[in-house]
Image (cartoon, grey):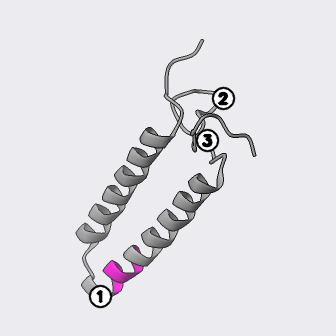
Amino acid sequence: MNRRDGVWFPAKTDCRWLWDLPTCWQGWTVVVCWWIALIAGVLYLSTIVGSLKGVVLFVAVMSLLLTAICYAKGERLRLRD
């Protein structure tokens, strides 16, 4: 896999405002663990708690967490011509 100086998530080549798929095992580990936690949390909250507000809040927090990880370990995003 292509690896650039600690970058786990490279910027997309077509728009540069999004991150692409991970380029190393650490990035893939983050993505897989994030999906497992997201699915388990949604299933738990929807069956046990039964609150749609709780599920939406959980998904929002998980999305912010993944975005923060991508920002910290990903390529810097910038406008390109």
Q: Which numbered disc, 2 or 1, marks the residue that appears first in the sequence?
A: 2
Q: Which numbered disc, 2 or 3, marks the residue that appears first in the sequence?
A: 2
- Toward the right, the furthest residue is 1
Q: Residues within 10 Å of mark 1 (few under 14, many from 20)?
A: few
Count all numbered tags in the image, as a single digit.
3
Q: Residues within 10 Å of mark 2 (few under 14, many from 20)?
A: few
- Toward the top, the furthest residue is 81
Say if mark 2 contacts mark 1, CB within 8 Å: no
Say if mark 2 contacts mark 3, CB within 8 Å: yes
Looking at the rendering, the stretch of residues picked out in magenta corresponds to 42-47
Q: Is residue 10 magenta?
A: no
What secondary structure is the stretch in magenta mostly built from? helix
Q: Position of residue 36 (x, y in %)?
A: 50, 72
Residue for point 56% across, 27% down:
16
Amino acid type shown at disc 2:
Thr
The reply, left or right, for residue 73 in relation to residue 44 is right
Please, is residue 31 above or below residue 71 in the view? below
Distance from Cα at disc 2 to Cα at disc 1: 42 Å
Q: Position of residue 57 (x, y in %)?
A: 27, 62
Residue 80: image tag: none
Q: Position of residue 47 (x, y in %)?
A: 34, 86
Distance from Cα at disc 2 to Cα at disc 3: 8 Å
The reply, left or right, for residue 74 in relation to residue 4 is left
Residue at the spot of label 3: 20
Secondary structure state at the residue bearing disc 3:
loop
Quadrant of res 28: bottom right
Secondary structure state at the residue bearing disc 1:
helix
Residue at the spot of label 2: 13
Q: Nearer the viewer, residue 38 or 75?
A: 75
